Structures are given as structure tokens and as C-alpha cells.
Image (cartoon, rainbow, N blue to C red):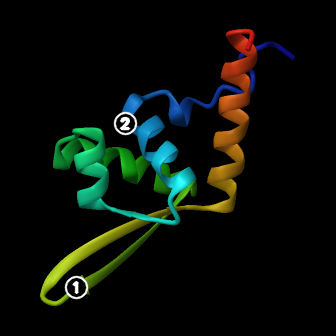
Amino acid sequence: MSLIDNINKAFDHRIRLGIMSILMVNDYADFKMLKELLGATDGNLASHTKALEKEEYIKVEKSFIGRKPNTRYSATKLGKAQFKKHINALEKLIGK
């Protein structure tokens, strides 16, 4: 097994890395919060959240607050486990 075997391609983009990092320390985050914290555009953030949702690493909940739509994200058990594995692999790679 090589050092990079546990590096997960799903987390190789800085926006996805950011989304997962935020969701690891918060129970959930809404679209607006992620957008502000990551400095991402709507389209960019939407495509990266879709990619993580497709892998079943994040769960998406849509609701309304008053009349405004609200999209809220949380990390799944699988997502958290895979992200921890990815971070551990990166740490091994840089020899922490």
C-alpha cells in the first residue's frame, strides 16, 4: 500500500476540502454560510456540494424560513470517516 492510497479524489479541490472541514466542526451549515466562509460563487459551491452529495459524504436538507428557501448541509457518517482517512493520509504524506 502506498502513501497516497487513502488520499480521496473527492476532497482534492479546495472548495470541497473547505466544505468538509466546516461540516466536521459544525453539525450543519447552510448555503449562505458556506458561500461566505469559502468565498465561493453560487455556481461553484453548488457543483461542489452536488459532487459530495453524490458520493454520499454530505446530506442536503431543503426547507423554507418564512418565504425564503434554505439549503442546509451536514456531513454523513461515511463522509466523516472518509474525510478523517483523507486527512490522516495527508499527514502521513507530509511526515507529521
Q: Nearer the viewer, residue 56 or 91?
A: 91
Name the residue located 40 percent from the left edge and 29 percent from the top edge. 14
Which amino acid lies under the numbered mark 2 shown in the image of this protein?
Answer: Ile
Residue 30 placed where, x, y %? Answer: 33, 64
Label 2 sits on a secondary structure element that is: helix
> For residue 60, what is the image quadrant?
bottom left
Using a 10 Å C-alpha cutoff, classify the residue at mark 1 as few (fewer than 14 neighbours), some (14 to 19) or many (20 or more). Answer: few
Look at the image and tell me whether residue 46 can be seen.
Answer: no
Image depth: mark 2 or mark 1 in front = 1
Residue 25 placed where, x, y %? Answer: 54, 53
Residue that sits furthest to the right in the current view: 1
The answer to whether 49 is drawn above or below residue 66 in the figure is above
Residue indicated by mark 2? 15
Name the residue located 72 percent from the left edge and 24 percent from the top edge. 89
- Mark before the other along the chain sequence, 2 or 1: 2
Which amino acid lies under the numbered mark 1 shown in the image of this protein?
Answer: Ile
Name the residue located 76 percent from the left edge and 17 percent from the top edge. 92
Residue 48 placed where, x, y %? Answer: 36, 44
Residue 90 placed where, x, y %? Answer: 66, 21
Residue indicated by mark 1? 65
